[in-house]
Amino acid sequence: MTIHRFFIPIIQFENDLIALSSDISWQLSKVLRLKKGNEIVLFDGSGVEYQVSLDQISPTEVVARKQKEFKNTSEPRIKISLYQSLLPRGNFEQVLQKATEMGVYEFIPIETSRTLFKARDIGDSYLNRWKRIIKEASEQSERAKVPTLSYALTFREGIEKASHEGLVVVPFEHEKKQTVKTLVPLLEKEEKISIFIGPEGGFTTAEIEFALMKKGITISLGPRILKSESAALMIIPIILYIRGELENTNEQRDSVY
Amino acid sequence: MTIHRFFIPIIQFENDLIALSSDISWQLSKVLRLKKGNEIVLFDGSGVEYQVSLDQISPTEVVARKQKEFKNTSEPRIKISLYQSLLPRGNFEQVLQKATEMGVYEFIPIETSRTLFKARDIGDSYLNRWKRIIKEASEQSERAKVPTLSYALTFREGIEKASHEGLVVVPFEHEKKQTVKTLVPLLEKEEKISIFIGPEGGFTTAEIEFALMKKGITISLGPRILKSESAALMIIPIILYIRGELENTNEQRDSVY
C-alpha cells in the first residue's frame, strides 16, 4: 500500500505533535477518509522526513504524532535547471509534471522570439496552478524536495542568468556535430546544468548566436524531430544516467514505504 | 519553414505522377490551403521518401509530381518494443505520442493484474484512434517508419511473445540492485529490446516471478517513483543513448527540410 506524502514548508513538532493546516486536514479526513492511527509522511524539503500517525481528526484540523524520522536520499546531486519555452497550457503542465518526477531541480518558463506567449502575461494564477502541479508530483514521486518555479524570463534574461551558474545547454535541431555525448566530460565536474528548450518553431539564429556568445553549447538530440514538450524528457534521463543518478537507492526511506 | 509529410502505405508513381486519397486531398486543399506548385513529402515506411509538388488540386483529389527521391536514415537500428500497461485514455495516448517521437519500433498494450482495463475491451475504435496518433507523431517527427500497434495482450501473453524475440526488461520499483547500467553489455549485441511498463499499482509478485522465469531482467529506474505514463519516457532515451542512436544525423533528408 502506498503511504501518502505531504509537503509542508516548515515542519515543527511540539512534544512530538504537529497540527496540520486546514487544506491538508480536509484532504486527509474528507478526500482520503483516513482514520485515527493511520500513518502518513511529512517532508519539508530539508531531506529529513517524518512518518506520523493521525491522533485527532477533524475536517479543519488534524493533529499528527511523530513515529519515526528518516532521511530521504532520492534527490539527484546534479542540479538540472529547466528553461522551458512557454507552451499551450496542457503541454507545459505535462513537462512540469514529468520533469519533476524525473528529478529536475528548478523550472524557469521562458519567452523566446517564436513563443506564442509573453513572459509578462504569466500571472500569479498560472504560477500558483503550476506550483501545485510540481508540489503534487514531488509528493507522489517521493522526492525529498519540491523544485522551485521562477517567474517567466525572456530567452536572453534566462541565458544571462544561467551563464553565471554552470553548464548552459541548448538542444538545437540544426546542430549536426555536437550531441549529448559532447557533454560527458563536462558533466563530470559540473554541479549545475541549465537546459534551454525552444518553442514549436525553434530558436532563431539570433538567439542561438546570443547563447553561443554566452558560452552556451548547442547539441543535437538525434535525427528525429521532437516536439517542444518532449525534448526535455529526452535529455533529462540521459543526463541523470551519465551522472550515475539512477544508481543510488533510497534505503532508509525504503523501510517506510 | 516546415514541409508537411504524409504517410501512405503504398506509394506508386505513374510517369512521376501520383493521385492522393480523398482524406489527404481534403487536408491539403482545405485545411492546409496549399496551392499548385507547393511541395510536400510522401513516405511509405520503406526508408525512401519522395518530395513532390502539387500539380492539380481539388478537395477530393490532389495529383502530385515527383521532384526528388531521398533516403531517410532517422530510424534507430535497435528495435524497441514497448509493452505498456493500459492507462486512462489521455495518459496512454501521451505515451504513444511521445514514445513514437523518441523512436519506438512497436507498441503492445498490456493488461496486468492491477490494470483497470481488460485487453478484450480494447476495441477497434480505440485502436484506430491510437493508430492515428502514432501516424501523426511519425509524420511530424520525420521518422521513416510508423510504429505498429498490436492488439492488447495479457501480461503473460506479452512476456511469452517477447521472450522469443530478444532482451526482456521489466522496470520494477522493488528492484534494488540492477539498473539501466546492467543492460549495457547486453545491449551491445541485441537487435531488439522489449520493455514492460506496469500499471499505477505496479506488477504483482506473481507477475515478476513469471517474467524472471522467462529470462526477463528487472531493473530499477532510480530512487524517484515514476508514474506509469512516465516510466517508458525515462528508459527509452537512455537505451537510445547507450546504443549511439542519437549520434547519427539524417543528411540526405536534411537537404530537403
Image (cartoon, coloured by chain):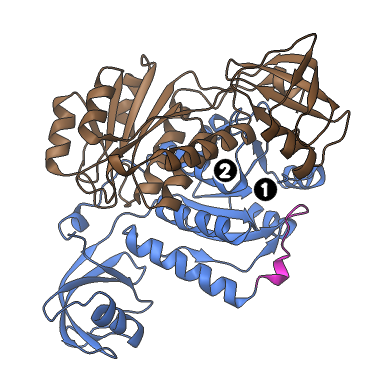
Chain colours: A brown, B blue
Task: Provide the secondary structure element on which disc 2 rests.
Answer: helix
Give residue A180's position: percent from left, percent from top: 33, 33
> Which chain is disc 1 placed on?
B
Identified at 88% across, 30% down, the residue is A36
Give residue B174's position: percent from left, percent from top: 72, 33
Task: Provide the secondary structure element on which disc 1 rests.
Answer: loop
The front one of A107 and A60 is A60
Q: Neighbour class for label 1 at 10 Å: few (<14), some, many (≥20)?
A: many
What residue did someone put label 1 on? B198
Give residue A215's position: percent from left, percent from top: 19, 23
Q: Image check: A33 left or right of A121?
A: right
State how far apart marks 1 and 2 are (Cα).
9 Å
- Name above or below for residue B44 compared with residue B248: below
Q: Neighbour class for label 2 at 10 Å: few (<14), some, many (≥20)?
A: many
What residue did someone put label 2 on? B231
The front one of B8 and A131 is A131
